Image: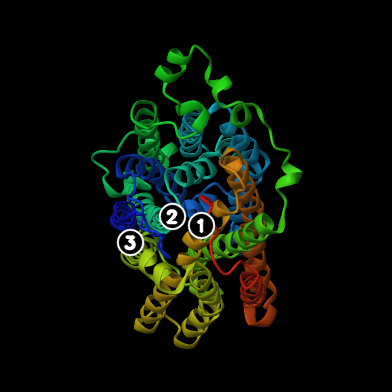
Amino acid sequence: MDTSNSHEIETTPLIPVKSSKKLKTPLPKLQIGILISLHLAEPIASTSIFPYINQLIRELGITGGDDAAVGYYAGIIESLFFVAQALTVLRWGRLSDRIGRKPVLVIGLSGACISILCFGLSTTFWSLVISRCLCGLLNGNVGVMKTMMGELTDSTNMAQAFALFPIVWSIGGFIGPLMGGTLARPQDRWPALFANAFWERFPYFLPCAVAACLFVLAVFITSIFLEETLPTKRRPKSTSAMLGISSDELLPQQSMAYTPLRSLLTPSVVIPIANYALLALLDISFRALLPLLFSTPTHLGGLGFDPATIGSWLALFGITSGIFQALFFARIVDWIGPKRVFCVSVSCYVPLMAMFPIMSWIVGARGEVDHAITFALLCLTGMQLACNMAFGAIFMFITASAPTNNVLGAINGLGQTSASAARVVGPTLATSLFAVSKEHNLLGGNAVFVVLIVLAGGLRWLASQLPDEVQDRDE
């Protein structure tokens, strides 16, 4: 009796006690590093066109010499990319749930490579449109990469992992505009090296060719080094051979089940996706208006910057945001929680949009771009640091909303579809309202910013509907 009690007393301390706070799981650094390096090619290519797109439209004679109408066509070109993406990205996500993540990524990266080359060789408005639509149709990369990130992480390290997406976009937002602004029209900068008639005919091909090389490298890395994360496609073959059965028989429910999309449209899924869609609308509107304001002549209320200056400022926005996200995002999420981070971030869109009419007023009052504009642009830089944190936070909510891993691709595809649809509306709405505001002097030429400030207020209310904590999918 005593021996039994003694044994019980000795073994009791060995029973694990459940901690109220789970220890963080170490990130699979190699695979996440590969995934992030692949993702970097996307923002570099997409943002590299921003410094010269408005000048390209003018040089092609699309507007007939009307500088105020440039915004219409720039918005149409960007919007059509997201139209094409919205029509197909959910299908790419659903397909990745069935055939695996890697094949879909290879297709998407290859399509992006071809489309950016076509863009650089475009000499008409319709060729620009076709190249951007091709990129959108073949591009399911972003949703699939988020799905893979969700499969590589759990609730304890998700904030660290998803913080990397805004960081990558920020780094791409630094390299892309700098590359596009520097390499555009190389025959003007380096006439000895680019004296061939080819560069006179295709003055914006060089930045597109460099971006295409990045996609070629990304396809190679994906094919050789990236591991599949879909559970039904990554099961070791030796296990199947030992048991004498196929992998489909090992996991029949995951491999064969096809969850109806309607069953996924629950409030816990719809609310985060709605927040992401409205956030994407505001973000793309800001990104479309910023280079437009930069390139618009000062007599129309713009800043009159050349492509190189535009590229430098956009690069500054990108690198500062990337550094901030890398150093502080995960810490801030651990401190105040993802919901508070998201609410604070989206609240900053109101003063961010208000900076546009303030800068126009400064130029109109002073008649030139001076140190006051530089100070305003530095303030704008600080505000967009806070705004960019919203993406990492909302990605956590969307990923955690998936009821099971075998529909994670569909959930991220649905989220990306909604964001793409919002990005269809964003550039067209923002740039067209900008042009109309300037042409008809609506609210002093600032009607577009009033509309966006109202939408920012709506997003702040929608953010309050998110759950207080990110759901633990492991449990």
* Depth check, front residue: 322 or 121: 322
- Of labels 2 and 3, the one closer to you: 2
* x then y, percent, for residue 398: 57, 54
Residue tagged 2: 158
Say whether residue 50 is visible. yes
Amino acid at pointer 3: Ala
For residue 431, side relative to residue 142 (left or right): right
**CA distance separating discs 1 and 2:** 7 Å
Residue tagged 3: 326
Farthest residue, direction front: 1
* Depth check, front residue: 405 or 321: 405
The image's mark for residue 465 is: none
Asked whether the residues under the numbered discs 1 and 2 touch, taking CB atoms below 8 Å apart as contact, a structural biologist would say: yes
**CA distance separating discs 3 and 1:** 16 Å
The earlier-in-sequence mark between 3 and 1 is 3
Amino acid at pointer 1: Met
* x then y, percent, for residue 133: 61, 39
Residue tagged 1: 396
